[in-house]
Image: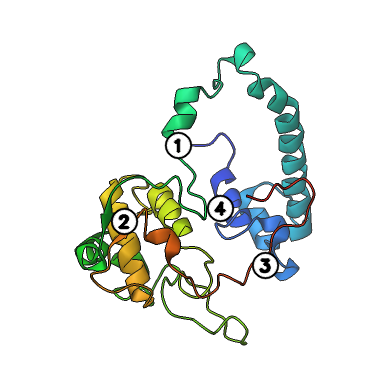
Amino acid sequence: MSSRFPGEASVWTALLPRSQPAWLLPRRALPDERLARKTHLARPGQTGAALRKLVLAIIGVSAVTMLWAGPVVAQGSRTGVGSPATASDIEAWGEIIGPDGDELPPGGATAAEGRALYDRRCAGCHGPTGTEGPDPRLAGGQGSLATDQARKTVGSYWPVATTLWDYVNRAMPFNQPGSLGVDEVYAAVAYVLFLNDLVGERDPVDANTLPRIAMPNRDGFVIDPRPDIAAR
């Protein structure tokens, strides 16, 4: 897309890198006098500090605009944007699986059944054994939390196994969350637990057995003491 202002695209590319906005960069990383001259947004003799003031001014105007427009956008009846969540919308999000597993659906699987699913849908992000990455490790790290090399994994950190079912069901795989069937979720959960030596390869994992799995860090959490938080 072309711009009406000479050098506009190049100055924004320079001032707003992907990693962080320019006003947060160290002073030595700000554009110098040569960049200011090149972009035509500063006269010869102006430095990176002048350009930073320009960016801050633009951000300030944008923030005021957003604050003014925010309440209006939130009122869908006036703008036609959005709509209240209906009972069916909320129901489609599914049950929240608590520690006791009462909300778990019928179904089940074993780690042996989950191996092929894991290799196909999970290993690309978490590694063949759940320890290689590049995404967070799923296995290992037991006994490491109190050391200088703590490794938070499903096996070392998570206090209850039912949380794993809830999370996989809602959020995995990363590129297609919510696409797994009930038995596929049980299969993936069983295999991750197997990688952590918490179930045998052919142990059934279902609504009855999953809540009874004793996670190594089950005593590592405390009840939230705040009076406005109701403990289940």
Alpha carbon distance from label 1 to label 4: 39 Å
Q: Position of residue 61 (x, y in %)?
A: 75, 36
Mark 1 secondary-structure assignment:
loop
Alpha carbon distance from label 1 to label 2: 18 Å
- Label located before the other in sequence (3 or 2): 3
Neighbourhood count class around disc 3 (C-alpha, 10 Å): few under 14, some 14–19, many 20 upward: few
- Residue drawn at (43%, 80%) of the image: 140
Q: In this view, does 145 lie above or below 110?
A: below
- Horizontal side of residue 114 vs 192, given as left or right: left
Number of the label disc, if any, that sits on residue 13? 4
Q: In this view, does 36 lie above or below 58?
A: below
Mark 2 secondary-structure assignment:
helix
Q: Position of residue 5 (x, y in %)?
A: 59, 38
Q: What residue type is labelled 2?
A: Tyr
- Residue drawn at (55%, 73%) of the image: 217
Mark 4 secondary-structure assignment:
helix
- Horizontal side of residue 81 vs 182, given as left or right: right
The residue labelled by disc 2 is 186
